[in-house]
């Protein structure tokens, strides 16, 4: 169906009404697409008109969504950010609120084995809990400044474990992990703690930080339990000042 209008048949008041309508429409269009609103006391530099959206999570997914927005909150299935080797892009209003972040907490900062015995293995735990929206997850590692040794006589130390298991009656020291993303979870997986100190140890352990947990996607409250273990032999020098300072490092992979 086709409609044909002739301007010669329109009355002047109708023409004025059409012109007024067009001007009003143009005015409102300009307001809706304004990029910055300011006054003497405030400035809104990134205004956006949306219908809805937000962040939704469960044990198996995380969803960042915005409705009625031209720029979406990223294109990755695991993060609101699109990335390459040289940039991170957070597009859309949601991405303004979801900056790349990582948080780590530890159940304690000090552990004690108590009195060591040749008849048993002593242990103590630290739980590392990680939350991050990093597209490629996180890496947690461990390193110490020196061997597990006496403060008053640094040549007296408990050697790093080298056979996968700290055993009662043997002078051995190391750690194992448990948790979904721990790397030393299985039986006979006790491993040494690397350190950067100058004093030698036997068996030798790498002087680079050792990864004890990692994941390749975002995580929420991802817990890894680190179980430190120590045992002594009948020839281990007695003392109540065996210590070691350990540093735990967690970095997001953005």
Image (cartoon, rainbow, N blue to C red):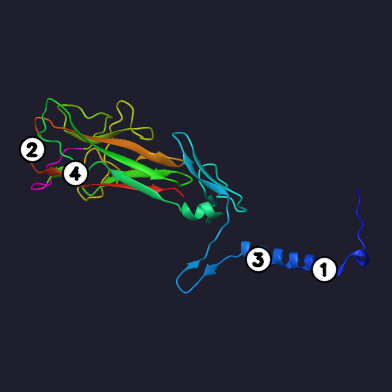
Residue corresponding to mark 3:
30
| Cα distance between the residues tagged 3 and 2 | 82 Å
| Cα distance between the residues tagged 4 and 1 | 86 Å
| Cα distance between the residues tagged 3 and 4 | 61 Å
Q: Earlier in the sequence, mark 2 or mark 4?
A: 4
- Crowding at mark 2 (Cα within 10 Å: few <14, some 14-19, many 20+): few
Looking at the image, residue 219 sits to the left or right of residue 144; the answer is right
> What percent of the width, then of the height, locates residue 112?
15, 39
Residue corresponding to mark 1:
13
The boundaries of the magenta stretch are 151-159
Q: Which mark is residue 176?
A: none
Looking at the image, residue 115 sits to the left or right of residue 92; the answer is left
- Crowding at mark 4 (Cα within 10 Å: few <14, some 14-19, many 20+): few
Residue corresponding to mark 4:
110
Assess whether residue 118 is covered by the magenta stretch.
no
Assess whether residue 152 is covered by the magenta stretch.
yes
């Amino acid at each position: 169906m086709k409609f044909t209008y002739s301007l010669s048949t329109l009355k002047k008041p109708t023409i004025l009404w059409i012109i007024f309508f067009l001007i009003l429409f143009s005015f409102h269009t300009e307001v809706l697409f304004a990029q910055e609103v300011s006054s003497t006391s405030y400035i809104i530099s990134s205004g956006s008109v949306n219908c809805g959206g937000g962040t939704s999570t469960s044990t198996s997914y995380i969803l960042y969504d915005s409705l009625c927005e031209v720029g979406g909150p990223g294109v990755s299935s695991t993060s609101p950010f699109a990335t390459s080797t040289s940039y991170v892009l957070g597009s859309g209003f949601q991405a303004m609120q979801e900056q790349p972040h990582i948080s780590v907490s530890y159940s304690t900062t000090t552990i004690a084995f108590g009195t060591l015995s040749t008849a048993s293995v002593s242990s103590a735990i630290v739980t590392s809990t990680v939350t991050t929206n990093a597209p490629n997850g996180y890496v947690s590692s461990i390193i110490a400044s020196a061997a597990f040794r006496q403060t008053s006589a640094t040549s007296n130390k408990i050697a790093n474990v080298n056979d996968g298991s700290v055993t009662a009656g043997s002078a051995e020291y190391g750690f194992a992990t448990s948790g979904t993303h721990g790397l030393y979870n299985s039986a006979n997986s006790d491993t040494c703690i690397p350190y950067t100190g100058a004093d030698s140890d036997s068996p030798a352990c790498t002087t680079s930080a050792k990864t004890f947990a990692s994941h390749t996607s975002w995580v929420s409250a991802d817990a890894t339990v680190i179980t430190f273990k120590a045992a002594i032999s009948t020839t281990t020098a007695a003392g109540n000042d065996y210590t070691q300072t350990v540093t735990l490092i967690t970095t997001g992979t953005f």
